Image: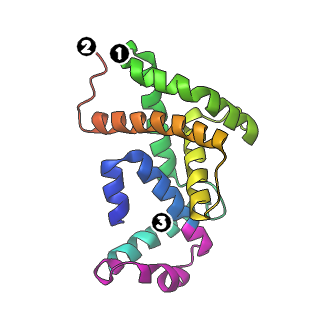
C-alpha cells in the first residue's frame, strides 16, 4: 500500500504497472488471504504488515466483486487508464504540446504494429502502450531477452508514456495550462 501510494503520487505510469503486477500476484495466490498471509506478507517489514494485509484484503475483495480473479483489471486501474486516455486526447488536440504530439507520432507506428500482432486493432492506444510496458516488465522478471526491434519500440513508447505521466502529474497539481 505504501509503495502504491507513493507511486501514484510520483509517477502514474509506474503506479499502474505496479497495480497490474499486484493483481497478478494476488491471482497467483488465488485471491486467498490465507495464502497471501503465508506467502506474501512475510516479505513486508513487520511494522507495515497489518496495513499491507488490510490493503491486500481489500484488493482481493474488489477482484472477487469485479470478477477479475482470472484476468482483467480492477475498475480503479481502468479508471486511471481512462484518465490517461482523456488527457492524451486533450494534449493531442492542443497545438501547444508539440513535443508531446511528436513523441506520440514517433511511438504510433509501434503501437499500431503491437495492436495488429495482438489482434487488438480496436484497443485504445494508451492501453496498448501499458500492455507493452507490462510485457517488458514480465520478461525482465523472467530474465528473458527482448529483441532489438522490440527494444526500439519500447523506447519510443517509454518516452511517450513518460511525457503523458508527467503531464498527468502537472494536471493533478494544477500546473498544467491547457489554454494560453
Decide which of 69, 113 is in the foreground and name it. Answer: 113
Outermost residue toward the front? 148
Residue drawn at the location 64% of the way across and 55% of the way down: 145
Q: x%, y% of residue 25? A: 55, 68
Residue where numbered disc 2 is placed: 180
Q: Earlier in the sequence, mark 2 or mark 3?
A: 3
Q: Earlier in the sequence, mark 2 or mark 1?
A: 1
Measured in 3D between alpha carbons, the distance from the residue under mark 2 to the one under mark 1, in whole angstroms, is 9 Å
Q: Quadrant of the N terminus?
A: bottom left
When asked about the image quadrant of residue 165, the answer is top left
Q: Around disc 1, counting alpha carbons within 10 Å, would you say few (fewer than 14), some (14 to 19), or many (20 or more)?
A: some
- Image: magenta residue range: 25-49
Q: Around disc 2, counting alpha carbons within 10 Å, would you say few (fewer than 14), some (14 to 19), or many (20 or more)?
A: few
Residue where numbered disc 1 is placed: 96
Residue where numbered disc 3 is placed: 59
- The secondary structure that dominates the magenta segment is helix
Decide which of 18, 162 is in the foreground and name it. Answer: 162
Residue depth check, mark 2 versus mark 3: number of the one nearer the observer: 2
Q: What colour scheme has been applied to the protein in the rendered image?
A: rainbow
Please, what secondary structure does the residue beneath circle 1 have?
helix
Label pair 2/1, CB-CB below 8 angstroms: yes
Amino acid at each position: 500500500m505504501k509503495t502504491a501510494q507513493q507511486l501514484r503520487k510520483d509517477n502514474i505510469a509506474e503506479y499502474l504497472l505496479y497495480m497490474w503486477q499486484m493483481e497478478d500476484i494476488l491471482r497467483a495466490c488465488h485471491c486467498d488471504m490465507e495464502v497471501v498471509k503465508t506467502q506474501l506478507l512475510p516479505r513486508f517489514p513487520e511494522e507495515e504488515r497489518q496495513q499491507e494485509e488490510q490493503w491486500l484484503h481489500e484488493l482481493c475483495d474488489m477482484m472477487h466483486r469485479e470478477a477479475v480473479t482470472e484476468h482483467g483489471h480492477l475498475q480503479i486501474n481502468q479508471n486511471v487508464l481512462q484518465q490517461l486516455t482523456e488527457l492524451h486526447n486533450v494534449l493531442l488536440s492542443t497545438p501547444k504540446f508539440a513535443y508531446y504530439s511528436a513523441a506520440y507520432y514517433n511511438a504510433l507506428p509501434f503501437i499500431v504494429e503491437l495492436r495488429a500482432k495482438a489482434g487488438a486493432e480496436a484497443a485504445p492506444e494508451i492501453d496498448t502502450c501499458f500492455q507493452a510496458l507490462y510485457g517488458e516488465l514480465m520478461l525482465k522478471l523472467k530474465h528473458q531477452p527482448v529483441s532489438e526491434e522490440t527494444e526500439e519500440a519500447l523506447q519510443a513508447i517509454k518516452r511517450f508514456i513518460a511525457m503523458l505521466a508527467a503531464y498527468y502529474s502537472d494536471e493533478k497539481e494544477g500546473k498544467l495550462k491547457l489554454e494560453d
